[in-house]
Image (cartoon, rainbow, N blue to C red):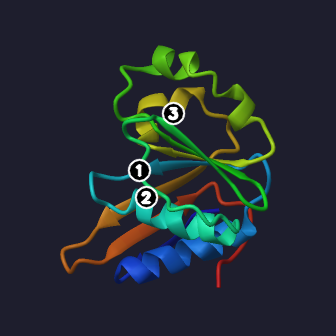
Amino acid sequence: MTISFIATDEAATIALGEKIGSLLSKGDIIAMEGTLGAGKTTITKGIAKALEIADNITSPTFCLISEYYGKMPLYHMDVYRLDGVEDFQGLGVDDMLYGDGVSIIEWSEKIKSELPKRTITLRLEPQSDGSRKITLENWQYGEIK
């Protein structure tokens, strides 16, 4: 199922992230796509809030993977700085991707071939009016209200 939303500002992006996060299950993988500043980390803040994670969520660009713990683990990855699939495989992410938490991968376009078919794609597209179009592909949880 593919569904799309318009988030008018940062608060709306976080609120949508909360709704998405409240429906996720252990083992879910979200492959995020979007330009620099599109809102990937912002929507992750909402997902983390739904998972009852109290930590401040920041972009893992320089550490590559940030782990957070709430009602289930959140593995927040940023593969922007990786040279390719081999670098991703070298991170030892299998335990995260196939574990008891939710994995979110920013700049996932670089390693898409390594992700399972059940992966949810979340695409963020900034609009000329400052809003963001947010599209979920391969969404298995029905409508988001």
Q: Nearer the viewer, mark 2 or mark 3?
A: 2
Label located before the other in sequence (2 or 1): 2
Q: Say which quadrant the C terminus sits in.
A: bottom right
The reply to whether dot 2 and dot 1 touch (C-beta < 8 Å) is: yes
Q: Nearer the viewer, residue 31 or 142?
A: 31
Q: Which residue bears the numbered disc 1?
A: 59
Point 74% across, 48% down: residue:
101
The percent coordinates of residue 121 (x first, y second) are 54, 51
Point 58% across, 63% down: residue:
2
* Residue at the front extreme of this rendering: 55
The percent coordinates of residue 132 (x first, y second) are 34, 72
Question: In this rendering, would 10 be left or right of 130?
Answer: right
Please say if 48 is above or below 115.
below
Q: How many marks?
A: 3
What label does residue 112 carry, if any? 3
Question: In this rendering, would 37 be left or right of 128?
Answer: right
Q: Give the CA distance from mark 2 to mark 1.
A: 6 Å
The crowd level at tag 2 (other Cα within 10 Å; few <14, some 14-19, many 20+) is many
Label 2, secondary structure: give it.
helix
Label 1, secondary structure: give it.
loop
Three-letter amino acid code at disc 3? Lys
* Residue at the left extreme of this rendering: 128
Point 66% across, 60% down: residue:
139
Please say if 15 is above or below 76.
below
Q: Which residue bears the numbered disc 2?
A: 41
Label 3, secondary structure: give it.
helix
What label does residue 1 carry, if any? none
